[in-house]
Image (cartoon, rainbow, N blue to C red):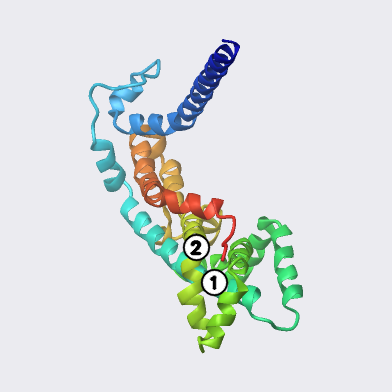
């Protein structure tokens, strides 16, 4: 009898603990998701209905899509969107080529001073990003690349952190695979693309997603290096919308523009969320 009572008591405690845990998680999810809900709700309210609300309403019975039309017709949001896609894809593609070869060299190739050079690379992570921005701005300006895509792209085509992350994953691949491949006459380049990259796919996908998000949300550098509206990215475009008065006068249309800009990243995360989780949680490769 005592054993049954103890078992029931343990089960009750487990249920209570589960209820409390899920309640707290639900509350936290509500806090995190509410700004997105409010953004979406505001974007489907009419201009007159929004201004008539002395007390904010948490729902609307007459949603409209006119704000999304205004967001594209009143300002050149489509151009900003295309510019951002070009900038993001080009920067991410070039960066992946750079960091893959750099990580492979540090992980597998044996050359004099390798550890010293890699240590110097890691030390660059301690330099504040603001100092690098000043140097990059002077360099790009002297090269005559202001208001060009190359001026936007070049300062972002490498990352010490991503090189380190990919190098650590490459080093977790058993050395025996490399030796066996060399015995079979496989070149280093073929081994990299046929063995190492497929094994490290979760980490590679995670790096790509993080870089895409970084490029899509980039604001400071594009704001410094471009003053030509034809080269504005979406982040600069939203700021331009605010500064020229449109955003202050028509908040629902402003929110519609923000929704349009946010949707690609949300969709990207939903599609690749499993890959991202696998890349973050990947602890090693066992042979």
Circles 2 and 1: CB atoms closer than 8 Å: yes
In the orientation shown, which residue stands out farthest toward the front?
1
Look at 29% across and 28% down and name the residue there.
Answer: 45
Residue neighbourhood size for the residue with mark 1, other residues' Cα within 10 Å, grouped as few (<14), some (14–19), many (≥20): some
| Image-quadrant location for residue 108 | bottom right
Which mark identifies residue 204? 2
Which quadrant is the C terminus positioned in? Answer: bottom right
Residue 156: image location, x then y, percent: 55, 65
In the image, what residue occupies the spot 35% across and 23% down?
Answer: 51
Tag 1 or tag 2, which sits nearer the N-term? Answer: 1
Q: CA distance from mark 2 to mark 1?
A: 9 Å
The label shown at residue 100 is 1
Give SS at disc 1.
Answer: helix
Q: Is the N terminus in the top left, top right, bottom left or bottom right quadrant? A: top right
User: Residue 269: image x %, image y %?
Assistant: 41, 48
In the image, residue 245 lies at what x, y percent? 41, 39
The image quarter in which residue 64 lies: top left
Q: Is residue 275 above or below residue 199?
A: above
State whether residue 217 appears in this view. Answer: no
Out of 99 and 6, give the one closest to the viewer: 6
Q: Position of residue 265 (x, y in %)?
A: 41, 49
Residue lying at the far bottom of the rendered structure: 185
Instruction: In the rendered structure, find residue 268 and report the number of the disc placed on it.
Output: none
Q: Is residue 105 above or below residue 128?
A: below
Q: Residues within 10 Å of mark 2 (few under 14, many from 20)?
A: many
Residue at screen point 57% across, 62% down:
286
């Amino acid at each position: 009898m005592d054993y049954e009572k103890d078992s029931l008591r343990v089960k009750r405690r487990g249920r209570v603990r589960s209820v409390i845990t899920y309640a707290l998680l639900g509350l936290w999810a509500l806090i995190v998701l509410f700004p997105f809900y409010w953004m979406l709700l505001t974007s489907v309210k009419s201009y007159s209905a929004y201004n008539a609300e002395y007390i904010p309403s948490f729902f609307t019975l007459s949603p409209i899509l006119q704000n999304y039309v205004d967001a594209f017709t009143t300002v050149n949001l489509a151009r900003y969107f295309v510019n951002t896609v070009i900038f993001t894809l080009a920067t991410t593609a070039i960066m992946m080529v750079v960091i893959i070869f750099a990580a492979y060299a540090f992980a597998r190739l044996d050359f004099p001073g390798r550890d010293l050079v890699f240590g110097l690379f890691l030390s660059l992570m301690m330099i504040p990003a603001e100092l690098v921005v000043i140097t990059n701005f002077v360099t790009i300006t002297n090269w005559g690349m202001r208001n060009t895509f190359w001026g936007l792209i070049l300062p972002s085509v490498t990352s010490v952190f991503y090189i380190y992350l990919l190098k650590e994953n490459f080093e977790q691949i058993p050395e025996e695979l490399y030796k066996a491949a060399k015995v079979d006459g496989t070149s280093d380049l073929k081994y990299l693309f046929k063995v190492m990259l497929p094994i490290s796919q979760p980490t590679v996908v995670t790096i790509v997603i993080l870089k895409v998000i970084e490029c899509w949300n980039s604001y400071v550098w594009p704001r410094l290096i471009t003053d030509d509206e034809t080269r504005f990215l979406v982040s600069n475009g939203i700021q331009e919308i605010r500064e020229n008065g449109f955003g202050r006068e028509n908040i629902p249309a402003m929110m519609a523009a923000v929704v349009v800009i946010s949707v690609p990243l949300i969709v990207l995360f939903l599609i690749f969320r499993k890959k991202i989780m696998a890349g973050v949680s990947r602890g090693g490769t066992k042979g």
